[in-house]
Image (spheres, grey):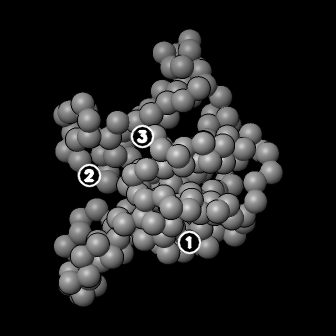
Amino acid sequence: GFYGVEFPGYGLSRGLKTTEKTMYLATEQLVQHLTKPAHEGGLGVDGGSLVLVGQSIGSAVAAEMSLRGYGKKCVLMSPFLSMRKVAGALFPFIAPGLVAAPFLLKDKFDNARKVGKIGVPLMVIHGDQDDIVPFAQGEKVAALKQDARLVQVSGANHNDLFGTEHEELVVGEIVRFATDQHTPYKVA
């Protein structure tokens, strides 16, 4: 099955302020509910069967949950190195200020510090025409973990991995990875 998290402040979710901490909290609560035995009020999903998937800012959440011991595999789609790095790529004129005054960004979403510590198999999927998170950041994220699989989606932008001509490739790669089927290191 598939279970999705609606982060605080996104979509119909209300109540909590959108922060790195509340996004981790919401996700961890869902994962705990999924894996809690049914007789205890949970859904009874085998925690050893979970494949964590996060796209864009969700990639940082999936990485964090993997570090906390959830999931048997992790897929990061359109991941960035850190909020500072992606902000600097989008707005180069602020990059020096973020280096000099890192406290300006309260939420770090620091994939660069986390990915190498993830103890489960990792796959990174990234469009090579991404205009929000440069493809080079996805390549660097994949390079931080030995044996990570990188799937380069030729012609894909940041928000068109699903619902476009790229969907069949992306879903196919996720299914093969999740089910232990052979996947080449790089798919163009």
The amino acid type of the residue labelled 3 equals Thr
- Quadrant for the N terminus in the image: top right
Give 101 or 3, whichever is nearer the viewer. 3
Q: Are marks 3 and 2 in contact (CB under 8 Å)?
A: no
Q: Is residue 183 above or below residue 144?
A: above
Q: Which residue is mark 1?
A: 139
Between circles 2 and 1, the one closer to the viewer is 1
User: Mark 1 falls on what kind of element?
Assistant: helix
Q: Quadrant of residue 91?
A: bottom left
Taking 94 as reference, is 20 left or right? right
Q: Quadrant of residue 115?
A: bottom right
Taking 152 as reference, is 157 left or right? left
Q: Is residue 119 above or below residue 137?
A: above
Give x and y (percent) for residue 161.
Answer: 48, 49
Q: Tell me the number on the disc at residue 19.
A: 2
Give x and y (percent) for residue 142.
Answer: 59, 68
Say which residue appears at 32% left-offset and 51% top-offset: 21
Say which residue appears at 68% left-offset and 36% top-offset: 48
- Quadrant for the C terminus in the image: bottom right
Give 188 or 67, whichever is nearer the viewer. 188
User: Mark 2 falls on what kind of element?
Assistant: loop
Q: Is residue 12 above or below residue 184?
A: above
Q: Tell me the number on the disc at residue 27.
A: 3
* Label 3 vs 2, first from the N-terminus: 2
Q: CA distance from mark 2 to mark 1?
A: 26 Å
